[in-house]
Image: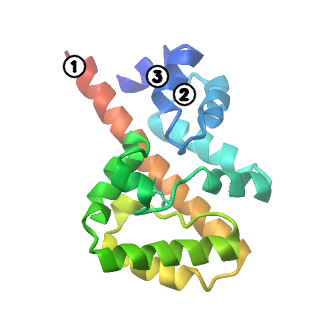
Amino acid sequence: MAIQVFNSMDYEEFINKFGNVIEKCPLIAAAVWTNHPFTSLGALEKMFEDFIDLLPPSGQEGILRCHIDLAGRDLLKGTLSSESQAEQNQAGLTDLTLDQRSQIRELNASYKNKFHFPFVICARMNNKDTIFRQISIRIHNSPEHELKIGIAEVKKICHLRLLDIFKQVSHNSKF
Ligand code: 2AL
């Protein structure tokens, strides 16, 4: 079973596997390993969530700041993390017209100018229309509210990345 495979990992293997379930925050996987063995994938996911929830607001803002702008230059250059690249691709963000690209660039810049962290949304639970709509709406929120929403989106991204790892390991351990 996948959870047994995860529980048998030393911390280096664990960080290699789970280091990017929270984008560019391997420290969280390194901390979560301390709590192994995990009883289930849900229990493992809760460890990631609990770690994030216990951070002060500056730490949670730090997590958001580890995310790269959606549909930005790195997506076009292919220099995002492989997970992020695939997620933005799946949401259709590689297929924007020139007009849409400059629109999202301006929206991302205005958003960052107001909140001092980037707009974060779970791309795989959205598409380009809902992403454009959400950034246009969320930019009017208070910083406190936006921090809460951004962190909730990070947890959705984490959930889907954990499921991907679980499926991949379950598949491999059948052979
Ligand atoms: C991302 C990302 O990398 N994956 C995703 O779903 N959303 N980034 C972001 N700024 O929202």
Marks 1 and 3 close (CB-CB < 8 Å)? no
**Pointer 1: what residue?**
174
Residue 113 x, y percent position in the rendering? 66, 74
> How far is disc 3 from disc 2 in space, using C-alphas?
8 Å
Q: Earlier in the sequence, mark 1 or mark 3?
A: 3
When asked about the image quadrant of residue 141, the answer is bottom right
User: In the depicted view, which residue is nearer to us: 170 or 137?
Assistant: 137
From the viewer's perspective, is residue 86 above or below residue 132? above
From the viewer's perspective, is residue 39 above or below residue 174? below
> How far is disc 2 from disc 1 in space, using C-alphas?
21 Å
Q: Is residue 86 left or right of residue 51?
A: left
Q: Which mark is residue 29?
A: none
**Pointer 3: what residue?**
6
Q: Which mark is residue 38?
A: 2
The colour scheme of the drawn protein is rainbow
Tag 1 secondary structure:
loop
Tag 3 secondary structure:
helix
Marks 3 and 2 close (CB-CB < 8 Å)? yes
Residue 26 x, y percent position in the rendering? 59, 33
User: In the depicted view, which residue is nearer to us: 75 or 62?
Assistant: 75
Crowd class of label 3 (few under 14; some 14 to 19; many from 20; radius 10 Å)? many
Residue 149 x, y percent position in the rendering? 59, 68
Q: Residue at x 48, y 47 (%)?
A: 158
> How far is disc 1 from disc 3 in space, using C-alphas?
15 Å
Three-letter amino acid code at the position of disc 2 = Phe
Q: Is residue 118 left or right of residue 167?
A: right
The answer to whether residue 129 is seen in the rendering is: no
Numbered-mark total:
3
From the viewer's perspective, is residue 81 above or below residue 71? above
Three-letter amino acid code at the position of disc 1 = Lys
